[in-house]
Amino acid sequence: GLANRALLLDRLDHAIELANRAREPDAGRLAVLYVDLDRFKRVNDSLGHGVGDLLLCRVAERLGASVRRCDTVGRLGGDEFLVVLERVADRDEAAMVAQRLLDGLSSLREVGEHRVHLTASIGIAVHPLQGNGESPDSTGLMRMADSAMQAAKTAGGDRFVFYTRDMTDRAETRLRLESGLREAVAARAFELVYQPKIEAASGRLTGFEALIRWRHEGAAISPADFIPVAEDTGLIIEIGRWVLEEACRTATRWALDHGPVPVAVNVSARQLADPGFARLVEQVLQRHGTPPHLLELEITETVIMKDVRHHLPTLNRLRALGVRIAIDDFGTGYSSLAYLRQLPVDVLKIDRSFVNDLPHAPDIASTVIALAQRLLLSTVAEGVETAEQRHWLAEAGCDCLQGFLISRPLAAEAAEAMVMT
Ligand code: C2E
Ligand code: CA
Ligand code: CA
């Protein structure tokens, strides 16, 4: 029958107890299947009011029909279900049931007068675990099945995946990172480093890109590792605000002490999508007395192009403030020429991977430079590491260069020393 969460956990606890007490090792094996519908929200939205609940009932029925009498199917909430298989002989038997569950779901073709196409991601945890002597409780077993379900989802859904130990390791690393990040946000434990950009033709300093650094448990964690976590958790909003404040404060100080030098700041997807973003930028500029043309915002091509229509008003508002806008990692995504012409942008940053191909495979770099010249945009090549690359880029008419050849990212004081000379 269909059990609720409490009943399900009871049942599971009981089964685990029996399994642990079983004399013959195979007698008490049980499997927990964590079932999560794929894209349920989308399906639900397309069905219209009230149909979602009916659909979930039908799903529960299908799942129930795919298991044996002695098994239990329960709804955990939302579109998540748990199936407890008692006395399974081995992994193969659990796999067979999982496949039956998937087949059962795909045979559900309509709800009321609506046509549906349903798939699910299923994670399987088997108890007792062969080999290692762990004996998790019901919560532990459910968590394992959940991790395996996430893995099934990541692999594209519509499949089942067995739990493995490294899934827990990964989840733990991720959790540690997440809580460390929360503390770091509260304690403002970040730092900005500044990587210079120079004019290709003259070698003159034209500005800096501000890059965030975080020291956690004695190690420097790469933004490539923690920015995605910050994005997922929403912490990026607060981190991004701090980066913006810090970069503007620095740009203003340098401008007053030495003369104007633009500073570029990376903007993530979530920040750009935040309806208050343009207003935030305006407030920060005002608060620090920063001339708007000294602030450049770098937004990756993928982020802009994924939802151009939605981002356009924000980009226009930012541009109207006098802020410069650069498309980062240009060439890696898909930009249509038509869109690019409409976008209020000033700079294309040629992605490092294409600079890396120079001088032997120059097609993309050439194309981006030609495109920028047609559209009256300026170009920055990122990740310039060799003298040959620098030479090729200068010859090809690329405006600015950035990369380890010119300089690594520098602490604020070292960057300031460059401004002075
Ligand atoms: P990005 O915006 O493409 O930044 C350039 C990255 O390339 C930086 O890595 C920089 O240190 C590195 N780099 C510069 N020159 C060279 C070179 O010649 N060779 C090689 N191999 N690498 C070079 P970093 O600082 O680790 O940042 C990685 C990414 O993290 C950045 O890629 C950016 O997407 C993100 N990020 C960094 N700081 C922030 C931030 O404050 N906010 C947000 N939202 N994202 C940030
Ligand atoms: Ca960047
Ligand atoms: Ca980049």
Image (cartoon, helix red, strand yellow):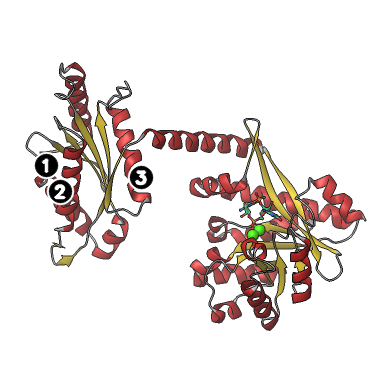
**Residue 44 marker:** none
Total numbered badges shown on the rendered structure: 3
From the top left corner, tell me how far across and down residue 324 is, in percent: 71, 68
Among numbered discs 2 and 1, the one appearing first in the sequence = 1
Residue at 74% over, 65% down = 389
From the top left corner, tell me how far across and down residue 220 is, in percent: 66, 38
The residue carrying mark 3 has its beta carbon less than 8 Å from ligand 1: no
How far is mark 2 from mark 1, CA to CA? 8 Å
Q: Which residue is mark 2?
A: 100
Q: Which residue is mark 1?
A: 67
Disc 2 is placed on an element classified as helix
Q: Which residue is mark 3?
A: 150
Identity, as a three-letter code, of the amino acid under mark 3: Gln
Residue 262 visible in rendering: no
Disc 3 is placed on an element classified as helix
Mark 2 Cα shell of 10 Å, populated few (<14), some (14-19), many (≥20): some
Position of 338 relative to 216 (above/below): below
Position of 245 relative to 198 (above/below): above
From the top left corner, tell me how far across and down residue 89 is, in percent: 15, 32
Closest to the observer: 383 or 211? Answer: 383
